[in-house]
Image (spheres, rainbow, N blue to C red):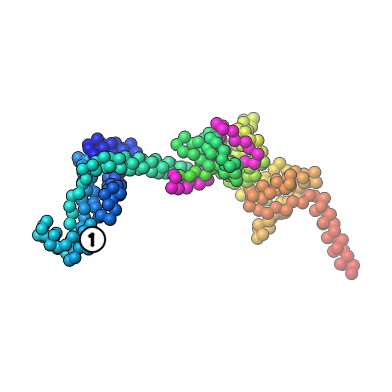
Amino acid sequence: MNLELIQALRDLEKEKGINFEVLIEAIEAALISAYKKNFGTLQNVRVVFDEETGEIKVFSRKIVTENASDDRTEITLDEARKLDPRYELDDIVETEVTPQNFGRIAAQTAKQVVVQRIREAERDLIYNEFTNREGDIVTGLVQRLENRTVLIDLGKTEAILSLNEQIPGEQYSQGTRIKTYIVEVKKTTKGPQILVSRTHPGLLKRLFELEVPEIYDGIVEIKSVAREAGSRSKIAVASKNENVDSVGSCVGPKGMRVQTIVQELKGEKIDIVKWSSEPTQFIANALSPAKVLSVETFPEEKMARVVVPDYQLSLAIGKEGQNARLAAKLTGWKIDIKNESALESNFEDREEEQDQEELE
């Protein structure tokens, strides 16, 4: 061990941000283990690493007792006082026991510790970087598929796109560039584990924030998002500036902005609706593209009854109820949709019942 090692450790402190004292402590602890492995596991020893010269010394530590039953860890008071008259019972006597060939073992051990610490420091740096990016978008390359799980190369590390977070029917070819949403970053013994998603509503929200300058600048605000990944989504937006059209900003010139997002999501349909503080108006907007005749709300039940023209009923409900389901998610209201004829029929039936009751 020499000055070159000390300089290397100082360089590591600057480059990797690994504290010099922490490295020294780790090397000393590893050297104790190395000494016991090679020269006796039952000995109690202390290793001293000289931070100025790089010299390593090993000291055996023995406790002063009346009767030493184990000379590897204990020493009698008489023997201790032969070394130094000032020793008393329960004191610790240290004697240098540095082996002649310990330099080679020390160098190899120090290298292993340094490599391990570098690896740990790099893992910590990656973890700290990505844990601060939870809820953000990252772009990476599809690296490989393992049991239907997609591993994505982010440069410094890999991200995991599990089957549940994949858009149904989407194909992931090796080398393809892909945007994903960071759901969670976990710290594991093998390093940081980055879990990403292609189905999370947050992905849609962040794509709009990246694509629409008015959202990025805070002029237009995304109020809520409802998404059925790979099929259809709804997004409610509001403008803080009356001169700025919130929906038009998101659609973009000739629909270019929203089409860019649709392409990124492999053709997923996106309805952009205007948010309103009035529940009746917001619910009507949320059922777009269907036209709504009236909305009656029941705040205590958080439910709304919506009436649409007969020819708009199927459009309002949507295929397999998707449009109504997404509108309910977007607004947070339960929505009961009725067509105009059915409502009139029910009204006439109630009138007849009332007339019959009066006659009786």
On screen, residue 215 versus residue 29, left or right, reads right
Q: Report the number of numbered marks.
A: 1
Q: Residue at x 64, y 41 (%)?
A: 168
Instruction: Estimate the x, y position of residue 175 in percent, counting from the top left.
Output: 55, 31
Q: Nearer the viewer, residue 33 or 171?
A: 33
Q: Quadrant of residue 231?
A: top right
**Can residue 8 be seen at all in this image of the molecule?**
yes
31 vs 301: above or below: above
On screen, residue 209 versus residue 266, left or right, reads left
Question: Mark 1: few, some, or many residues within 10 Å (few <14, many ≥20)?
Answer: few
Residue 184 is covered by the magenta coloring: yes
Element assignment for label 1: loop
Disc 1 marks a residue whose amino acid type is Asp
Question: Which quadrant would the C terminus be assigned to in this image?
Answer: bottom right
On screen, residue 279 versus residue 79, left or right, reads right
Question: Which quadrant would the N terminus be assigned to in this image?
Answer: top left
Residue 14 is covered by the magenta coloring: no
Q: Nearer the viewer, residue 343 or 82?
A: 82
Q: Nearer the viewer, residue 300 or 328?
A: 328
Instruction: Estimate the x, y position of residue 326 in percent, counting from the top left.
Output: 67, 47
Q: Residue at x 21, y 55 (%)?
A: 61
Q: Residue at x 82, y 56 (%)?
A: 346
**Can residue 217 be seen at all in this image of the molecule?**
no
322 vs 171: above or below: below
On screen, residue 255 versus residue 2, left or right, reads right
Q: Residue at x 71, y 51 (%)?
A: 295
Residue for badge 1: 70
Question: Start and end of the magenta stretch?
Answer: 167-191
